[in-house]
Image (tube, rainbow, N blue to C red):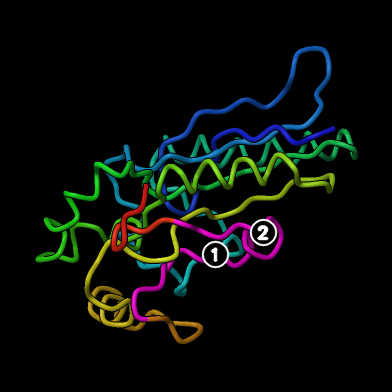
Amino acid sequence: MCPCVVQSSAVRLGHSASTRAEQQGNPGDGGWHDSGGGHRRQPFDTPPPYIPVDEEYPARPESSYSLAKHLEEQMAAQFCRWDPQLTAIGLRFSNVMEPDDYARFSSFQDDPALRRWNLWGYIDARDGAQAARLALSYPEPGLQVFVIANADTVMERTSAELAAAEFPGVPVTRELGPHETMLSIDKARRLLGYEPRHSWRTPVP
């Protein structure tokens, strides 16, 4: 029985989402994934408790929309409680980008505040598809939620500079690579074998 992967609430990031929790006649395996954007109150108007953000800190939806997505995760947890053999996978996608979107990234550079709303993260649609394929092969029952982002940010400034300028006082829990994402993908790397293959810095077909 393979997992069903659907679009996750980004209850910490406030992104848009769509869901499918059950399959007709057999609850089987369920999940969801996130596509980014689509709300008025930005998720990091209130600074995150730490950087990089991960799946562990308590949900903090900032709109009725992202609140609904948080409730989806709670429902998925209960479905798994009802059926201990159920596998539910949530993929919290960062802002999804197609290769043609990368031409816009130069417009982000003069004002870092424009993209602080999701910690300057993004996900190449091709890497998003990779994460979905990997999640469909995840073997363990129960609920798992993964942040899915590319390995870098949308900015030319270093991640350390961005964090210090826009979120002074927020703990940075480890040394960041020069342009390392601040949306931690460590769990997805560890459990799914996810590894982003694309970047706006070095576009490849």
Q: Identify whether 203 is placed above or below 67.
A: below
Q: Which residue is mark 1?
A: 54
Residue 72 appears at what percent x and percent y? 60, 35
Nearest the viewer among 164 and 201 is 201
Mark 2, secondary structure of its residue: loop
Residue 13 appears at what percent x and percent y? 43, 52
Q: Which residue is mark 2?
A: 193
Mark 1, secondary structure of its residue: loop
Residue 190 magenta-drawn?
yes
**x 41%, y 43%: residue:** 15
Query: Which residue occupies the extreme top position in the image?
Result: 25
Spatial CA distance of label 2 from label 1 is: 17 Å
- Please tell me how crowded label 2 is: few (under 14), some (14-19), or many (20+) other residues with Cα within 10 Å: some
Query: Which residue occupies the extreme right position in the image?
Result: 84
Going by the numbered disc 1, the residue's amino acid type is Asp
Residue 2 appears at what percent x and percent y? 79, 35
Q: Identify whether 193 is placed above or below 165.
A: above
Q: Is residue 104 left or right of residue 167?
A: left
Going by the numbered disc 2, the residue's amino acid type is Gly
Residue 100 appears at what percent x and percent y? 25, 41
Answer with mark 2 or mark 1, whichever residue precedes in sequence.
1
**x 40%, y 73%: residue:** 180
- Please tell me how crowded label 1 is: few (under 14), some (14-19), or many (20+) other residues with Cα within 10 Å: some
Magenta highlight: main SS: loop
Q: Is residue 190 left or right of residue 94?
A: right
Identify the magenta region: 178-197
Nearest the viewer among 93 and 60 is 93
Residue 132 magenta-drawn?
no
- The label on residue 15 is none
